[in-house]
Image (spheres, rainbow, N blue to C red):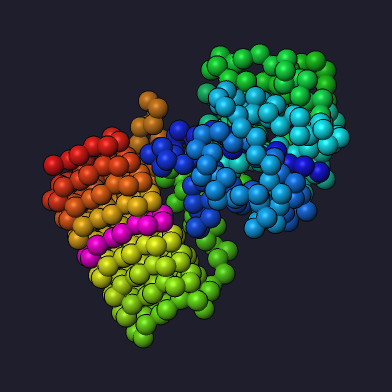
Amino acid sequence: MKAVILAAGEGKRCRPLTLTRSKVMLPVANKPILEYTINALVKNDIKDIVLVVGYEKERIMDYFEDGINFGVKIRYIEQKTQIGTAHAILQARDIIIDHGEEKFIVLNGDNIIGPDAISDLITGAEGDATLLTCKKDDVSGYGVIVAKGKRVSEIIEKPKTLVSRLINTGIYLFRTEIFEMIENTQISATGEYAITDTLQAMIDNGMNVTMTATNAEWLDAAFSWNLLEANTIVLGDLEPDTTNAKIEDGVNIKGSVSIGKNTTIRAGSYIVGPVVIGDNCDIGPNVVILPSTSIGNNVSIASFSYIKNSILMNDVRISTHSNVSSSVLGSNVSTGPNFITEEGDDMLIQIEGELQNAGKLGTVIGDDTEIGGNVLVRAGNMLSINCRISSGKTISEDIPTDSIVI
Ligand SMILES: CC(=O)N[C@H]1[C@@H](OP(=O)(O)OP(=O)(O)OC[C@H]2O[C@@H](n3ccc(=O)[nH]c3=O)[C@H](O)[C@@H]2O)O[C@H](CO)[C@@H](O)[C@@H]1O
C-alpha cells in the first residue's frame, strides 16, 4: 500500500519559525516532524511514499532526497498553490491510479505520530473511507467528528462551540473513488478545497464514511511554543548515547543524554537529561543544560551559560553568562554575553487576532537574528527572522522581520 503525505502548506500559526521552513520541517528532539511520520510508516512496512510539497519544498527535498536513507522510496509531487487538503491529495491521483492501487493512506505531514496510529487505522478501516480519530480535551483548532458507532454522521471543521471531543487526526484510509469525490468538492467559505468537505459530501450522499479511534501518540504543534511540549514528550523516549562525543574530565552528565559526533563538552559542564545535542557542537566550559532541551548541529554555548527546557536549532551561537529558558531559537541565531530570556507562566499570546494560552514561555526567535550583549527578552515576546538587536536593549514587544533595534 502507498501513503500520500501532505506537506505543501506553511503552517502560518508557527511563525516566525515557518517563515524559512514549513511546519513539517520544524525539529522536535533534533528530527523534523515529518521524519516521525515516515518512521511510523516504515514500522508498518509502508515504504512507498508520495510526498506533496509546495512551500519551501527545497528544504524538504534536500533533507529526505529519494528516501533511501530513511528506508523508503519517496516520489515528490508539487502543489503549486496551497488551496486546501483535498486539492493537495488530488495532486497524487496519477501516481496512485497508474499503479493500480485500490486503497491508500493519506496523512498530514505536520503531526508527530506513533506507529500504532497507522496499524489502528488499517485494522479498523471499513466502508468507503475511514478517518482516524483521537480524543482531546481541548479540540479548538481541529475538525471534530460526530458518529454513531463507527459510522460518521458529521465532520465539523474548527467549531466555535464544543460538539465532540473526538478530533480528526488528519490520517485516512481512502479508496481511489475519493479522487472523483474531490473533483466535485466545492470551495469552502475560507477559500479552500478541504478534504473534510469531501467526506461530508460523501456522508450526505449516503456513502459509508467510518471512523476508528486511536490511543497512539499523536502530537500537534499548533503554535510555535507547542514545540516545547512535543519536545518534552518525545525526549521522554530518548536513548542515551555519548559514545561519539568528546567529553572532558570534570563534566557531570545525569539522566538520558545523547550527544552527537565531534561535539565537545568542556570541563565543569553539568547536563541533566533528557537532553539531545547534535554533531559538531562546542559546549562549555561550565555550562548548565537542564531538561528538556534539544540542541541541533554546529551549536556553540560559551562558559557559564544556562539552558533549560528549550530548542536550539542548527548553527546557534550563545555567548557567555546567558540564560535561555522555555524558548525556541531558530537556525543561525547568535547572542552576545549576558543574553537573558525571561520566563513567564500562562503567557497569553495574540495570534491571528485571537489570544492563545502559551503556558510557560520565554521567547521564540526566527532564523538569522543577531542579538548583542546584555539583552533581556521579556517573557512571551517573539523576535522574527533576520533582526539585529543592539547591546543593552530590553525587548518588551514582538519584533518584526528584518528589524534593526538600536
Ligand atoms: C480541512 C482539513 O483537512 N482539516 C484538518 C486539518 O486541519 P489543519 O488546519 O491543521 O490543516 P492544515 O492546513 O494545517 O494542513 C494539514 C496538512 O496538509 C498540508 N496542506 C495543507 C493545505 C494545502 O493546500 N496543502 C497541503 O499540503 C499541510 O502542509 C499540513 O501538513 O488537520 C487537522 C489535524 O491536524 C484536522 O483536525 C482537520 O480536520
Tell which of 114 and 110 is nearer to you. 110
User: Quadrant location of the C terminus?
Assistant: top left
Stretch of the chain drawn in magenta: 311-321
Q: Is residue 170 above or below residue 317?
A: above
Question: Does 217 lie within the magenta span?
Answer: no
Picture coordinates of residue 141, whole percent (x, y): 53, 31
Is 210 displayed left or right of 257 in the figure? right
Is 346 displayed left or right of 376 in the figure? right
Question: Residue at image x 39%, y 62%?
Answer: 298
Is residue 357 among the parts visible in the rendering? no
Tell which of 235 and 177 is nearer to you. 177
Picture coordinates of residue 40, whole percent (x, y): 68, 52
As drawn, which residue projects farthest toward the bottom? 249
Question: Residue at image x 68%, y 28%?
Answer: 91
Q: What is the quadrant of residue 270 in the picture? A: bottom left
Picture coordinates of residue 101, whole percent (x, y): 84, 36
Is residue 102 among the parts visible in the rendering? yes
